[in-house]
Amino acid sequence: MLQLVNCILSIYKQRHFFHHSHSLSFTYKIFLNFSFSSCTNMIKFTLFLFCLLILLPVIVRGECTCDAEEEEGDRNKSEALKYKLGAIAAILVASAIGVCLPLLSKFIPALSPEKNVFFMIKSFAAGVILSTGFIHILPDAFESLTSPCLDENPWGKFPFTGFIAMVSAIGTLMVDTYATSYFNKSNLRKAQSAVTGDEEKSVDNGGAHEHMHVHTHATHGHSHGRVTVQDSVPSDLLRHRVISQVLELGIVVHSVIIGISLGASESPKTIRPLVAALTFHQFFEGMGLGGCISQANFKTRAVTTMVLFFALTTPAGIAIGIGISNVYNENSPTALIVEGVFNSASAGILIYMALVDLLAADFMNPKVQASAKLQFGVNVSLLLGAGCMALLAKWA
């Protein structure tokens, strides 16, 4: 501001001197004109900058609108519906194939959990799940919960996205721990009751004296009678069952949200790249989930239920989005809060499961630790899986 005042005063002095002096040379006249022009430009620039600073909050506020992002010319409801129906079919088939491929290990010996190839496939799938949490879900959650469409208080005053993801990861750890502990204790009680029942039957046939002897030893856990533990389940198997169920929960929550978002859109320009990206997205996620299900050795009915639940979730979300497309506004506060909270929770679950239950467990496996070649293979597979999934973030 001081420079501006000095410049104005210099212009006044130069003009006054110019009008009252008749002995100026031609060169000095040019210098005066140049100085006058420079100061005038500086004044104009300063005024422009001052006006820009005043109007900047208004300009920024004008960009932060809560209207739908799709322009009116991009909307074509009938054409968008065709893409949505195609997306339902493509994603359904890709999800089913992806989750069923690891389950073929029972029929293809090369894909059995004891083979090196299985470790590499599972590392690839774990990289996909990890990248899904960090690259796809968490940024969407940040975008939703920091939207200008939400009230500044409380959404702008606290990092809810990271907090919810952290609480979700801690909650997953607790569920993982308590569920494994509960099933282990339940399985042990069933095994002990089965042993006690068999001993009592055998003692009834052999006499009262034998009954007392065997029953006493059974209570101390070292009976000499015939032990049948057909209904018992190894602790490792229980661990895989808990992991597969919690992992499916995290994947399903995210799948419903992305399905609704796609189904509610009425812009073919937006839907077209999403169909291909989400098809690969669900295929890779299905491979990760299928690897966990195959290690859990569920019964056929349970496996079928989990496969169908995963394969149908995103298509069901798309169908819901189609049904509510007329009333759904992705920028409404309710939609933003629901999507942000669920995406944050889903990200926390998937990041925890990928790092702790999938990667840490496999990378510390004695078979992997004993082979440098296998270690190199699982690391490369992990990077490939994370890289492929991260690349899809360009379109979805």
Image (cartoon, rainbow, N blue to C red):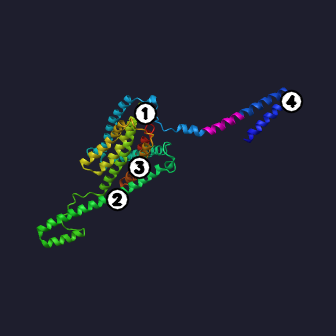
Image quarter of residue 219: bottom left
- Using a 10 Å C-alpha cutoff, classify the residue at mark 4 as few (fewer than 14 neighbours), some (14 to 19) or many (20 or more): few
Residue 82 vertical placement versus 99 (above, below): above
In this view, the mark in front (3 or 4): 4
Secondary structure mainly formed by the magenta segment: helix
In this view, the mark in front (1 or 2): 1
Q: Earlier along the polypeptide chain: callout 3 or callout 2?
A: 2
Quarter containing the C terminus: top left
Image point (30%, 50%), residue name: 295
* Front one among 19 and 301: 19
The answer to whether one can see residue 369 in this image is no
Image point (36%, 41%), residue name: 282
Q: Which residues are magenta?
A: 42-55
Q: Position of residue 62 (x, y in %)?
A: 54, 37
* Front one among 230 and 179: 179
Q: Which residue is mark 3?
A: 345
Question: Marks 2/4: CA distance?
Answer: 97 Å
Q: Earlier along the polypeptide chain: callout 4 or callout 1?
A: 4
Q: Is residue 318 left or right of residue 36?
A: left
The answer to whether one can see residue 57 in this image is yes
Q: Position of residue 195 (x, y in %)?
A: 20, 64
Q: Label 2 amino acid?
A: Tyr
Residue 237 vertical placement versus 223 (above, below): above
Whether label 2 touches label 4, CB < 8 Å: no
